[in-house]
């Protein structure tokens, strides 16, 4: 089974702190994604990466950055956390190959509360 | 830009009954995929069903089926013989074929199943 692992399920950080959310996948997928989930808004794409050291902005990249130094790991960074970044963050991965509709696999999510 | 709309924030169904969740989308593309994802309280997003836009036949996965109306840009999910384990958030999602696997999600529908 594909496994996408997010290192922290629940975090509480103070305003202004630097926050790292880590994600690791074990299926050698080329594509990795960070989404933010808020009630009524569904999931919104923050950043994605289609290869090591490559990154592309999604719909809401402001206030976030990412790092992909290794194929299996994709990190989301909040340089200076703010209360409006309190949310659930979901990491996902998928293969480049157009097989089975390029299914996207999700991690369990990280609840971040900024106080 | 593509948009996905789920007009029902909450739905409820009696166990063993059938329920239909609505989804509409807006796109100018002709080659795309549509998905329904389930997110139970554990928060792990699970792919329920997938539909390729070029296929006229509606996708079916056991108790789950879709009604895909391409001209109307409608993609509803029907759950037959509802079970308690079907209770979850359901997200409709769209992906353009060449969009690097990026999904655009609707706002979600919370499904409650009554025993």
Image (cartoon, rainbow, N blue to C red):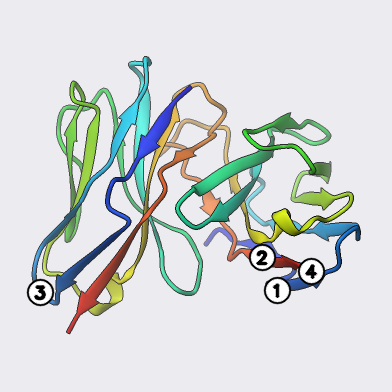
Specify the subunit that label 2 lies on.
A
Identify residue for label 3: B16
Q: Residue at x 79, y 51 (%)?
A: A75
Mark before the other along the chain sequence, 1 or 4 = 1
Q: Real-space Cα distance between discs 1 and 3?
A: 35 Å
Q: Nearer the viewer, residue A115 or A62?
A: A115
Instruction: Report helix, strand or loop for mark 4.
Output: loop
Q: Quadrant of residue A100?
A: top left
Q: Position of residue B42 (x, y in %)?
A: 49, 74
Quarter of the image for residue B100 reads top right
Q: CA distance from mark 3 to mark 2?
A: 34 Å
Q: CA distance from mark 2 to mark 1?
A: 6 Å
> Marks 2 and 1: CB-CB under 8 Å?
yes
Q: Mark number for residue A110?
A: 2
Label 4: which residue?
A115
**Residue B61 relative to residue B80: left or right:** right
Parent chain of label 4: A
- Chain of the residue on which disc 1 is drawn: A
Horizontal arrangement in the rendering, residue A57 relative to residue B55 (left or right): right
Mark 3 touches mark 2? (CB < 8 Å): no
* Numbered mark located on residue A10 in the image: 1
Q: CA distance from mark 2 to mark 4?
A: 16 Å
Q: Are marks 1 and 4 on the same chain?
A: yes
């Amino acid at each position: 089974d594909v496994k996408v692992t997010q290192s922290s399920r629940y975090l509480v950080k103070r305003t202004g702190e630097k926050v790292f959310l880590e994600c690791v996948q074990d299926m050698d997928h080329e594509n990795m994604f960070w989404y933010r989930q808020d009630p009524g808004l569904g999931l919104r794409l923050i950043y994605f990466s289609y290869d090591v050291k490559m990154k592309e902005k999604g719909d809401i990249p402001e206030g976030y950055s990412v790092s992909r130094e290794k194929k299996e790991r994709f990190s989301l960074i909040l340089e200076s956390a703010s209360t409006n970044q309190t949310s659930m963050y979901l990491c996902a991965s998928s293969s480049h190959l157009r097989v089975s509709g390029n299914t996207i696999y999700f991690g369990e999510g990280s609840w971040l509360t900024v106080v | 830009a593509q948009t996905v709309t789920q007009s029902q924030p909450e739905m409820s169904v009696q166990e063993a009954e059938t329920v239909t969740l609505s989804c509409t989308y807006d796109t100018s593309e002709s080659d795309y995929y549509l998905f329904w994802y389930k997110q139970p309280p554990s928060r792990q997003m699970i792919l329920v069903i997938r539909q390729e836009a070029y296929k006229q036949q509606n996708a079916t996965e056991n108790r789950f089926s879709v009604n895909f109306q391409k001209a109307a840009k409608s993609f509803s999910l029907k759950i037959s013989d509802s079970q308690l384990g079907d209770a979850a958030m359901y997200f409709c999602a769209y992906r353009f074929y060449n969009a690097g696997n990026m999904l655009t999600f609707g706002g979600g529908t919370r499904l409650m199943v009554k025993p």
